[in-house]
Amino acid sequence: LAKTTQPISMDSYEGQEVNITCSHNNIATNDYITWYQQFPSQGPRFIIQGYKTKVTNEVASLFIPADRKSSTLSLPRVSLSDTAVYYCLVVMDTGRRALTFGSGTRLQVQP
Amino acid sequence: DAGVTQSPTHLIKTRGQHVTLRCSPISGHKSVSWYQQVLGQGPQFIFQYYEKEERGRGNFPDRFSARQFPNYSSELNVNALLLGDSALYLCASSLTSVIPSYEQYFGPGTRLTVT
């Protein structure tokens, strides 16, 4: 399993763009990169998934360089409600649906 | 549409007892996974079931078992409870095992406290 490393915590202010970078140096050719968000006392919520280059949805963007050894989750114009833990996961392309979570990045958005 | 539901919401048990946690997946979802989340850590994979068959098992002792019913709901059983089993137990469902989507839908969890 590809190990992921991401910052333990980040602070930001409302209206700013937040970029959370995750490193996954030993990612395999068929692995996908997935990000989840979790609020206290709730289950994680899928944010975005990608394989290479850039993926964008209504919530976030995911940037993956050509070597795929890292990825950056970008949250545009954060609000207080974006305060949560963000998990970067590398998921094996085996059909097995188990997700391996690390400790995540705790994002605190200030007013 | 209803999301993933879990019962009970909270549970307090004593060491050595047995517990059964229940999960109903989103309608149409055939895959159910169970995770344990200890305070301050990310969720840890316990089991995955698809079409009523076990498809994956994490690094948990045999005290943990699970099953999936014909309606795709699932139960997680834990025997001989230890203090260290105190955690939030999460159930997640997904449509199929077909890749490449890895979007899993998590329920709110069951908070288990072992005293």
Image: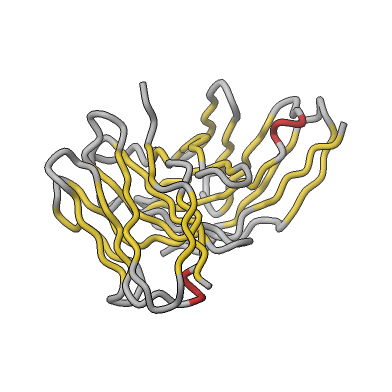
Residue at left 77%, top 48%?
A: A10
Rendered image quadrant of residue A80: top right
A70 relative position to A31: left or right: right
A11 relative position to B88: left or right: right
A19 relative position to A99: left or right: right
> Between residues B33 and A57, which one lies in front from this camera angle?
B33
The residue sitting at the left extreme is: B70
Colour convention of the picture: secondary structure
Q: Position of residue B114 (x, y in %)?
A: 50, 69
- Image height of B85 relative to B6, above or below: below
Rendered image quadrant of residue B13: bottom left
Rendered image quadrant of residue B67: bottom left
Residue at left 46%, top 73%?
A: B14
Q: Position of residue B48 (x, y in %)?
A: 27, 55
Q: Position of residue B55 (x, y in %)?
A: 21, 57
**Quarter of the N terminus of chain B within the rendering:** top left
The residue sitting at the right extreme is: A111
- Image height of A3 relative to B63, above or below: above
